[in-house]
Amino acid sequence: MMPQIIETDYLVIGSGIAGLYFAANAAEHGSVLIITKKRIEDSNTFLAQAGIASVFADDDSFELHAKDTIRTGAGLCDENIVDMTVREGPDRIRDLADRFGVPFAKDSSGALDLGMEGAHSRRRVVRVDDFTGKTLVHHLRTYVEKLPNVRILENYLAVDLLSTSKYSNENACFGAFVMDRETGRIDTVVARATILATGGAGKVYLYTSNPDTAAGDGVAMAYRIGADIANMEFIQFHPTLLYHPKERGFLISEALRGEGATLKTTDGVAFMKSYHPMGELAPRDVVARAIDAELKRKGGDYVLLDATHMEKSAIKERFPNISARLMDLGIDISSEPIPVVPAAHYSCGGVVTDEWGRTRIPGLFAIGETAHTGFHGACRLASNSLLEALVFGYRAAQKVKETAITPPKRIIPWEPSPNVGRDEGVIITHNWDEIRRTMWNYVGIVRSNARLQRAKNRIDMIRDEIRRYYNLTTPNADLIELRHLALVADLIVFGARRRRESRGLHYNIDHPEANPMYARDTVLWRGTGPVAT
């Protein structure tokens, strides 16, 4: 089948809460095409357990939520963006309940049953038991699929963004090359605006809570087209991923610690109070480093999350998803502790945007985890991610109707390599594994100058090999994703080497203190950072 040219008003790349919520609102004034590399459900949103942080309690306030966010962000939050986001959050959550029918948990009085999580000073996490993300995706998808001017293409992978710079002196985005994973055909999508909602980049690490679709595609493509990328060194490691041979990537929600579960060494000693006065409710960067320190000190593979002192019926009622999954694996959390380890979870950096989700490239927007709005700073406050995705998904949908990018009259289609090349699948699998191990070993929870230099040397060599292979063969989906992943790894290393201090999620043992000179974003763009191709 010949490659197609597909036209739409708005191209959305990604199917998490940011992309779906944008589509639901933008469809009111234009046609929307959503592409997602696997199924709609293959997103970080779908796996989110805890909920959405927002102000609803009588003893809470926007000022308190903003203060908690800024304190956790370790000096790098944009305070205007924080204030705007926390104030707009309640309306977005009401919209989810009223328009989309999301059944948020209520208490006996009919008010929202708010959860408590780390580094929050009040109960403010709106939830659907412990499978909030799954419920959000279901309701948003059901709503969007009924809209006549929304089209969804599953199993489509974005290859590269389209720029007018290939046709003129300006640099605006007018769509993307996308691959049909089933056929390998690369189509051209022409759009008035392109919205990156590709999620995070957890797959760049060996151990992650993210689905295997989280390869940082949006960040890589935006960087290649000339967008600003900021703060990629701030990778949040969730403290409590289940450690079990039969289950990789299953997250144990922070909400369990919020309700009283305790972290202990394998010999039963609680340790968090010796690292932070908030104990188990300390910011995630503190908890992850504490676990890492205890594992290195004890030489173990995991620590324990103990909820056995909590009321059995309350645990199963509050955490039905976690309880059931662990019971299937032979772990009764009401009578035995849970083995856990930290894992890569969330990227606080991304494509730089303004308060409407606009990048500096006309026609290109970024929302959700793939964006850097200034909301999270150097460390994300728990359950602020879905909040940011909702607020900016909505704001982008309001602003995008003002975008008027005119595509070239004659579109140059995808130009495949004239060299068919040999099927060297081993090159892809080997480099994939080496990138993830290199990042885990050298650019993980605790870093050093020497480790970062080793990482740079290896990533440089791997990217050079990928470039040569990519130019000599017709790429398949695995090679395209590997190319994205390798560039994202390079951006993380580049940012980490520039930041000669420890702040938030970036901890360097050679520079263990925060330095006021670095109380600013690390911004990279094509020509100032790694090689873009």
Image (cartoon, grey):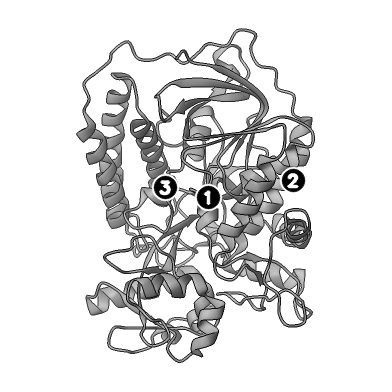
Q: Quadrant of residue 192?
A: top right
The residue that label 3 is drawn on is: 492
Mark 1 or 2: in front is: 2
| Crowd tier of the residue under label 3, counting other residues whose Cα lies within 10 Å: few below 14, some 14–19, many 20 or above | many
- The residue closer to the viewer here, 529 or 192, is 192
Residue 359, position as x, y percentages in the image: 64, 37
Q: Quadrant of residue 478?
A: top left
Residue 313, position as x, y percentages in the image: 52, 86
Residue at point 45%, 86% (across, down): 273
Q: Earlier in the sequence, mark 3 or mark 1?
A: 1
Q: What kind of residue is marked 1?
A: Gly
| Crowd tier of the residue under label 1, counting other residues whose Cα lies within 10 Å: few below 14, some 14–19, many 20 or above | many
Q: Are marks 1 and 2 in contact (CB under 8 Å)?
A: no
Residue 457 seen by the camera: no
Residue 157, position as x, y percentages in the image: 46, 33
The residue that label 2 is drawn on is: 395
Residue at point 41%, 36% (across, down): 484
Q: Quadrant of the C terminus?
A: top left
Q: Earlier in the sequence, mark 1 or mark 2?
A: 1
Residue 464 seen by the camera: yes
